[in-house]
Every structure is written in C-alpha cells, then in structure tokens.
Image (spheres, rainbow, N blue to C red):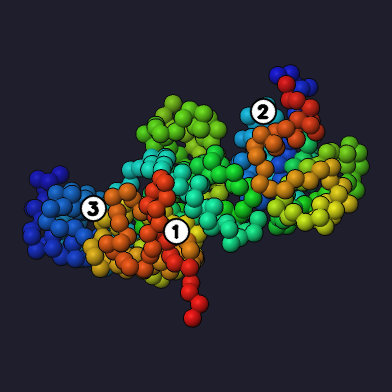
Amino acid sequence: MDDALPPITEDEFRRLADFLYRRTGMVFTETKRYYVERRILERIIATSSQSFAGYFAYLRSEVRNEVEHLINAFTVNETYFYREDHQLACLSADLLKERVMAKRLGDTIRIWSVPCSTGEEPYSIAIWLLENWKDVDAYDIEIVGSDIDTRVLEAAAEGIFGKRALMRLTPQLIDRYFHGLDDERWQILDDLRQSVRFSRVNLIETKETKPQGRFDVIFCRNVLIYFDDESRRVAAENLYDNLLPGGFICLGHTESMSRISPLFEVCRYSGAIVYRRPQELRA
Amino acid sequence: MSESSTKRILVIDDAALVRTYYRTALEAHGFVVEEALNGLEGLEKVLLQPFNLVIVDINMPQMDGITFLHTLRSRELPVSGIPILVISTEAGKQDMAAARRAGANYYLVKPIKQETLAEYAAIFCGAPR
C-alpha cells in the first residue's frame, strides 16, 4: 500500500503529531515515526483519501468521527487478566481495608479502571475481589471502566476473550467466571458484565473526567507514560479530583507519581507502592 | 445426580457481584442456582418454578426483602412454605425482628464466607447429592 502514496514529509508528520498532542495529550516524536506513519496510511486508505494533505483536511473537518477513528488506531490495547496481580493483592489486603474503616456495611465502594482497554482490568478486579476479599458481599462495589478508545469499550462490554487474555487465570477460575463460546473464545458471565459500567473518557479533558465522580481506588496503569510533562500534570490533577480524600491510585510498576505531581502521598504496602490523596485537613 | 436430588436455590440481590459470589459458592457444592434482581422478580420466579430455598437481601430497589417476605408468606401453599434465608448488611436487632415477623426462617449478617453460606444452604435443603 505504501507504493501508492508519497511518503509523509517531515512537516506533515510534525503537523499531525501536533494535532494528536492537542487532542489526546499523547506525544509522538520522530522516533515513533514508523509507528505513526503506518497508522496514518491505514486511515488514508480507509477513508479513500488521495493524499496526506487531503486526509489531514478531512480529519480537521471533524466529519464522520475521523478523529475518533484515528485515536483508536493509535491506542495500544493488548493486555490480559490478572496483570500485575501484586496490586490486586494489595487492593484486597490493604487498600480496601483502609477504605472501609470510614464506611458502614452496605456503603458504596467505587473503583475506577482507566484506561480499561477491552475490559481485562475491571473484570480482573471483580474476579479478584470475589476470590480474595472476604467482605465482597458486604459493600456495594461499583466498578467503572473507562477508555479513550470507543472500539475497545464496545468489546469490553461484550466481554469475549481469547486464550492470550486468559493465560494467567487457572482453568478453575475460567470455569467459574466464563462460558466457552468455542475452542478459542470465552465470554465472561452476565452477572460480571453487569457489575462493571463502561464509559468513554479522555484523561486530559476535565469536562470528561469530572462526571465520572469520585472513587475510593483508581487503577491508572501504563498510560501516563504516553503523555508529555504538561499532559501528565493535567491528567494527574484530574485523577486527584476523581479521588475521594484518602483514596488510592495505582500506577504501572515502572511509573512514579512523585515525578509527575506533588499532590499525592506515597504509601508503601508489602506488595506494592501506591499513591494516596491526603485526607482533607481542617482549616 | 438424579432429578429428585437436585436442590434449587433462588438468590435475590440487586448487586451482580454479590449474586456471582453466592452462586459460585452454592454451585461448587452442587446446588442449582437461579437469580433475581429484586423482590418483584423473585416473586415472579417462585411462582413459576419450584425452589428448596430462597436467599434474599433486604435493601433492594422495586421491592425490598421484607416486602418480599410478607408477600410470599401471604400466598397459598406450597409457595408460601418455602424456607427463606435473609442475608443483609443491616445488623440491628430491630432488622432481624422485622425479618422474623415477616416470615424469615433465619437471618445472617453480611459478610458471609462462601463455606458458611453452603453450610446453611445444606441445613435448609439437605445435601444436594
């Protein structure tokens, strides 16, 4: 397909990278050029544009959700159940124990998985709590999964997974919480699908994060690494506002909130480092 | 397992996660589980299908557990005679008394261990196999 179109010039690449940055906060430097070019060419062909210039004009005219299609093409979605399960262990052993101290039986506990990709993380949280948290029936647990990519949200709501996504689950867990559709695909039980609500959110758009409300625990893993300093700071501030005072946020194991924002306090538990929104101080 | 030894339990709770938690516990011990999201749907199910036990929550939308109990107990036999186990986060003496007055056989306070739930189910239904 590359033969049919002239290569994207440096100037075109820069304009597109600027556009993506303004819309998503994701930074694409020259080093990501091959990655960006591949996806742009896919979209040029998909939209039957004749050239990059033609495509870029189409993109900026905001017709037919092209911006959304392009963003979808740029997001990395492969993940699997029980990824970084030491954090899930920390959730059931430490974080929720702290959160329920100020609650009464039957109160709501809100957990946010953002970005949630095709649902592996929010459903993992649900299964983990069913298996490992003794108070799972004593609180009203609300799990929300959000992502910028609308395609993955549809897939997440459907809850169908292949072998790779399930590789870390034991056969017993798969039997208990999924039903097989064929040799290659399993669908998560209806009750679990109903226990997670999905919504589209761009983390650097406060008007999109705010309506999600405040959470007891947020899982925000391996997304801030795609942002530059400024977007990262905006995202961190939004996440802070989405936490209840005393609420926790878990990042990917290579990420550090201390480098991004001074708003949070670091908490070390046996299994993981997590960050916390300080309890509100009385004036 | 023969047809006659199958023990059927209806779980009525508005929280999907809680229903899954009870269902997996009970199914692991051989019980057959049906679910309802509130008292109204629960009532519909007991009128249509036979159950050996109903497990019901108190706080639910549409029809709460106490109203469900009152309504079920005012029906004809055999529907009105189904054993009912209430499981709720409401732990006050007055809550238990209200459930008992409405016709609950027994009252457990959440959280419940899966093993414990299965033991109580077996007490009410007999062992499933």
Question: In the rendered view of the protein, which quadrant contains the N terminus of chain B?
Answer: top right
Residue reaching furthest to the bottom: A283
Depth check, mark 3 against mark 1: the one in front is 1
CA distance separating discs 3 and 1: 39 Å
Amino acid type for the residue under numbered disc 3: Arg
Depth check, mark 2 against mark 3: the one in front is 2
Amino acid type for the residue under numbered disc 2: His
**Residue at numbered disc 2:** B29
Dot 1, how many residues are within 10 Å of its Cα: few (below 14), some (14-19), or many (20+)? many
Task: Please identify the quarter of the rendering in which residue B45 is found.
Answer: top right
Q: Chain of mark 3?
A: A
Residue A228 lies left or right of residue A243; in this view the side is left
For label 2, the SS is: loop
Q: Residue at x 45, y 39 (%)?
A: A160
Question: Would residue A148 be seen by someone viewing this image from the given angle?
Answer: yes
Dot 2, how many residues are within 10 Å of its Cα: few (below 14), some (14-19), or many (20+)? some
**Residue at numbered disc 1:** A248
Image: A12 above or below A272: below
Q: Are marks 2 and 1 in contact (CB under 8 Å)?
A: no
CA distance separating discs 2 and 1: 37 Å
Question: In the rendered view of the protein, which quadrant contains the C terminus of chain B?
Answer: top right
Which sits in the foreground, B129 or B49? B129
